[in-house]
Image: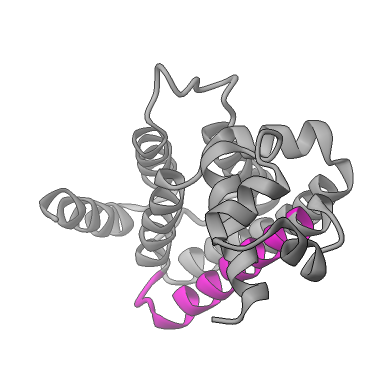
Amino acid sequence: MVVRERILETALKMFRTYGVKGVTMFDIARDCGISKKTVYEHFADKQSLIDEGMQQLLNSHIAYFNECLQTTENAIEEQVRNMRYIVTLAKTLNPVMLFEIRKYHPDTWRSIENFKADSILYNIKENLKRGMTEGLYRQNLHIDIVARMRQLQLEAAFDPIQFPADQFEMPTVMDQVTAHFILGIATIKGHKLVNQYLQIKEEE
């Protein structure tokens, strides 16, 4: 791995663990086993590391969602796999990071907001359309409303104000709200699949 990639990987790991405010360029250099001067040779400042790190994280999300769409048998399997992905992500992501980016790095947060509108919301809508076409979701769903409702659920699960880390485990929160969401939009045919996938999940 080249030095620049190692710096970025280390920075992103530290941001996801500790948040962005308390992590310094010296901390990143020390964790990489290099000098702070070397870090600055590749990144002008901490802001550039935050921007590029977040973009890499968002790009990985897009790649996964696209792969999931192509390899799942139906819309419910796609939803469940996306849930598992988000739960896995939640286990390695301190929600403080998003809170601090929103508060202290408005330009970076704007790119995250654009990602929500351009990718997350689009992905949710496409899944709803797929499920309705497959007869797994109710035909009377108002896609724009239901998609935004789901997006708000996802945002709330990552909000430390709504679900403080000392009171709630994010994977549990995500598991609960997702199961509730899918069961709420599924047809009788869809419910059978939901139960099947959730039972498989519990046995793993």
- Image spot of residue 132 (x, y percent): 49, 64
> Which of the pair 178/34 is nearer the observer?
34
Question: What residue do we see at 52% from left, 38% from top?
Answer: 94
Tell me if residue 68 is in the magenta stretch.
yes
Question: Does residue 197 appear to the left or right of 69 in the view shown?
Answer: left
Question: What residue do we see at 41% from left, 58% from top?
Answer: 85
User: Which residue is situated farthest in the left direction here?
Assistant: 203
> Which of the pair 193/160 is nearer the observer?
160
Image quadrant assignment for residue 174: top left
Q: Quadrant of the C terminus?
A: bottom left
Question: What residue do we see at 56% from left, 37% from top?
Answer: 18
Question: Does residue 181 appear to the left or right of 73 in the view shown?
Answer: right
Main secondary structure type of the part rendered in magenta: helix
- Give the color scheme: rainbow, by chain, secondary structure or one colour: one colour
Image quadrant assignment for residue 1: bottom right
Q: Which residues are magenta?
A: 50-74
